[in-house]
Image (cartoon, rainbow, N blue to C red):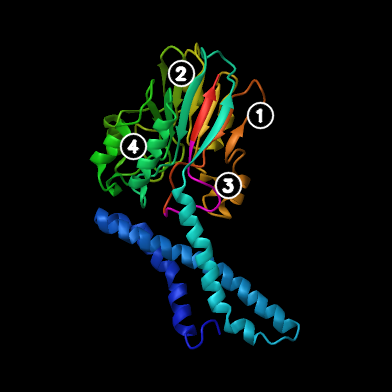
Amino acid sequence: MYFPSLDPVLFGLVFALFPIASVITFYSHRFPVKFKKVVDWIGGIFMLVFMFSFVFWLIYDVGRLILRCFGNNPTLFGKYGGFAVAILTAALIIPGFIRYLKVRVVRYKVDLCHDIGGNLNAVLISDVHLGAVNSERHLRKIVRIINEQDPDVVFIAGDTFNNNFFAITDPESTSALLRSIKSRYGVYACLGNHDAGNTYHYMADFLEKSGIKLLNDESVDVAGRFTVLGRIDPEPMCGFDEDTVRCDIKTIEEKMSFDLPVIVLDHNPSKIREYDSKYDLILGGHTHHGQMFPGNLFTHMLFKVDYGYYRERSDLPAVIVSSGAGVWAMPYRTASACEVVVIDIK
């Protein structure tokens, strides 16, 4: 028995966690914002407990089966198995919350194919997921770290929001926090798959009021030194609107001069093959580098570049994919860390 005299209750509770957590997670947008935060915490923790305890119980049952096959009595093994599962589950969950709190600074040096007129100190963030659990408090740390880098320019590679603009508890103070980002040449953003849905227009207005230039398949020349092209995400959750649809790259190129080095913000790194030698640097996110083990194993299989720096050839653009400054769903990470990326561009 896993826990003496508690098997029916324990199994009933644990195996009810998944449907309960799923309902809470998918319908939490219907609740008032403050109540939604509580509901998100409950749903997220339930899902974590279910996921890890299920794995450990599976290992436990396989172990008992092996003991029986070899003629051994698994009574002692079973007596303490439930306690072992509970301890191991807690041992995995608690460090994941702690790791989320530590936002690291990751640095890269990139030599562009085209002259950018000296060094450019750029900062990249992605996947802030405003509206997710603890996201607004977490943003304070992110902005502080950005400003400590004394950036020339700041790039946000999508998923600034978490599907629902009204999930943000205090939009005014959050907007003021974003306006406090210090950058010589400004802050530029593209859309991610979570920057979508019925509140998309509120999101776009919020970015404008926050001093962030949103580029929807548009390009802008910055200080006569470089061009920033922001791409619309190809797979938005619940869509943007009928006028916000990702264009073919050839259509965009017809409107660009390519007189300056081109830096592309494209949230989903699955599209990096769209860019040839006319482009210099592709910046993305989306993958979270798995966020939770074994998610990183799957992102590595799904994407040619799921994290870090990549350059296939010297005549093709460099690619940097961030694991994200924030998190989706729960403030929890095991497979990767929250990060602010600093890029020394030459």
Of label 3 and label 1, which has the lower sequence position? Answer: 3
On the rendered image, what quadrant is the N terminus found in?
bottom right
Of label 3 and label 2, which has the lower sequence position? Answer: 2
Q: Mark 1 highlights which residue?
A: 312
Q: Mark 2 highlights which residue?
A: 227
Give me the residue at 63% from left, 82% from top: 77
Identified by mark 1, the residue type is Glu
Callout 3 touching callout 2 (CB < 8 Å) = no
Residue 192 or 181: which is nearer the viewer? 181
Of label 2 and label 4, which has the lower sequence position? Answer: 2
Q: Which region of the structure is painted magenta?
A: 330-340
Identified by mark 2, the residue type is Thr
Identified by mark 3, the residue type is Thr
Image position, residue 238 (x, y; %): 38, 45
Residue lying at the far front in this picture: please name it.
148
Q: Residues within 10 Å of mark 2 (few under 14, many from 20)?
A: many
- Main SS, magenta region, reads loop
Measure the alpha-carbon separation of dots 3 and 2.
Answer: 30 Å
- 192 above or below 3? above
Image position, residue 299 (x, y; %): 58, 47
Q: Mark 4 highlights which residue?
A: 241
Q: Mark 3 highlights which residue?
A: 299
Image position, residue 119 (x, y; %): 52, 18
- 97 above or below 104? below
Q: Residues within 10 Å of mark 1 (few under 14, many from 20)?
A: few
